[in-house]
Amino acid sequence: MRRRSFLRAAAVGAVTWPLPRSAFASEVEPLVLSWDRNLLTISGPRLPGETISVWYLEAYCRAGSTDADWTAHTVVPHETRLVSATPQRIRLQCRVADGLIVDHDIRATHDEVDFRITARNPTRQRSVVHWAQPCIRLDRFTGANQESYLAKSFVFLDGQLERMPTRDWATEARYTPGQVWRDAGVPAEDVNPRPLNPLIPSHGLIGCFSADESMLFATAFEPWQELFQGVIVCLHADFRLGGIEAGETKSIRGKMYMLPNDVPALLDRYGRDFPEHRQPGRH
């Protein structure tokens, strides 16, 4: 009897003994968001480098920017205020100098950050803003510097992932270095004044691999203006506003993915999230 009682107790103990939180929590814990002085920070225990910093937003920009002075012509001043914040949701409001008001609803899950943006023009004249820049700094994620992160970074050309520097790498522009790819419907005169690649990407998706290549980061917005490889170990998928008319409201959405290194799975998810990017004739 004593042996049977002991075995029953042991069996009950084996079933009810609590597993250490660390055994499973990191697999399901959501990413954590914070925002301070125009810097959005994404953090999490599974994230290579533990944090990704996003200059949110770096700039609202005018058209006619490809061969123009960045400060004197292109940048339209703005101010951003924090509306509300929880660890998985940040709400911001930008007021742009021409009167445009842009609300940002930013939410995190365990492997992505979702952006829902509403831009409204309450003025009596068309907004001069054509596009805006979230600047994503990826030095910690890639474990690389300005020179070495290039080989970790990618875009998609002719449906295939290409690491940078890609084919037809451009080297001449008002400002160098860097590389810009525009959406098919965006005029070549209306993008970042860095070297403009002549190729049109097959996807509005840009990203990079982690230091050990076990994970990838990728980002996309709809509608999008350009993809950009910058000069502070950064990547951009800059979203398009297109000059919002008086009284008009536009919606923009975006994603930042932090996933295992499985490119087909990334493309499948991207295709579900951005079905417009699969339309015939649309890149």
Image (cartoon, rainbow, N blue to C red):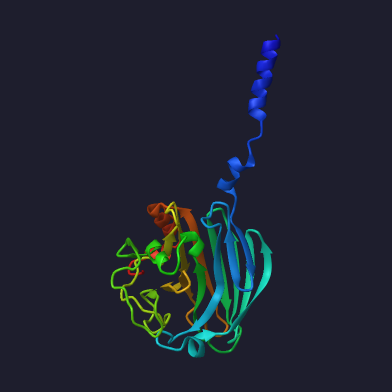
Kindly identify the residue that appears in the image at 54 percent across and 61 percent down: 113
Quarter in which the N terminus is drawn: top right
Q: Position of residue 76 (x, y in %)?
A: 54, 85
Figure quadrant of residue 57: bottom right
Quarter in which the C terminus is drawn: bottom left
Using residue 227 as the reference point, say whether residue 1 is left or right of it.
Answer: right
Q: Nearer the viewer, residue 33 or 63?
A: 33
Does residue 205 appear in the picture of this structure? no
Is residue 266 positioned above or below 7 on the image? below
Using residue 184 as the reference point, say whether residue 132 is left or right of it.
Answer: right
Q: Nearer the viewer, residue 215 or 219?
A: 215
Kindly identify the residue that appears in the image at 59 percent across and 40 percent down: 23
Q: Position of residue 28 (x, y in %)?
A: 58, 47
Using residue 139 as the reference point, say whether residue 41 is left or right of it.
Answer: right
Q: How many marks?
A: 0
Kindly identify the residue that appears in the image at 43 percent across and 88 percent down: 68
Figure quadrant of residue 278: bottom left
Q: Position of residue 183 (x, y in %)?
A: 38, 74
